[in-house]
Amino acid sequence: MVAMVSRRTLTLAGVGTAAGVFSGLFGVGGGIVMVPMLVLALGYGEREATGTSLAAIVLIAGVAAAVQGLYGNVRLEEAVLVGVPAVGGVLVGTWLQQRVPTKAISLLFAALLLASAVELALP
């Protein structure tokens, strides 16, 4: 007997698939793709979407880095030089996120996405 899969489970799988495609294609997926989709499609709060996205990124980044490494696209020493200070940034950012109003987080995130879009679109 085939078990019924809930709409929520299918939506989560769709979010994960989209995040994986964007991660493999552009090196992004968690924050830029997953957070808005969790908020808009599944009604997550900003903080829950961020935390869930970060947990998923552990899996996404590990597999993506391994596959990119097979293609010879990883500069491991430089990745460590970027990654180690980023851990400190994550601690500061998470501390700030718990103290900044959710609406401000949404607006700052929207501004970041808009600025990124403009930068990418300009010659």
Image (cartoon, rainbow, N blue to C red):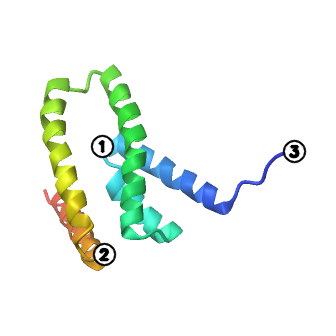
Label 2 CA crowd tier, 10 Å (few <14, some 14–19, many 20+) = some
Quadrant of res 34: bottom left
Could you tell me the amino acid type at mark 1?
Gly
Q: Which mark is residue 1?
A: 3
Residue at screen point 16% across, 50% down? 89
Give the alpha-carbon distance from disc 3 to disc 2, as whole Å. 44 Å
Earlier in the chain: of badge 3 and badge 1, it is 3
Identify the element where label 1 is drawn.
loop
Q: Which mark is residue 102?
A: 2
Identify the element where label 3 is drawn.
loop
Q: Is residue 40 visible?
A: yes
| 24 sits left or right of 108 in the view | right
Give the alpha-carbon distance from disc 3 to disc 1, as whole Å. 40 Å
Q: Is residue 120 visible?
A: no
Q: Which mark is residue 95?
A: none
Earlier in the chain: of badge 3 and badge 2, it is 3
Could you tell me the amino acid type at mark 2?
Thr
Residue 39 position in % (x across, y down):
44, 68
Label 1 CA crowd tier, 10 Å (few <14, some 14–19, many 20+) = some
Camera-side residue of 48 and 37: 48
Residue carrying label 1: 27
Q: Give the mark toward the camera: 3 or 2.
A: 2
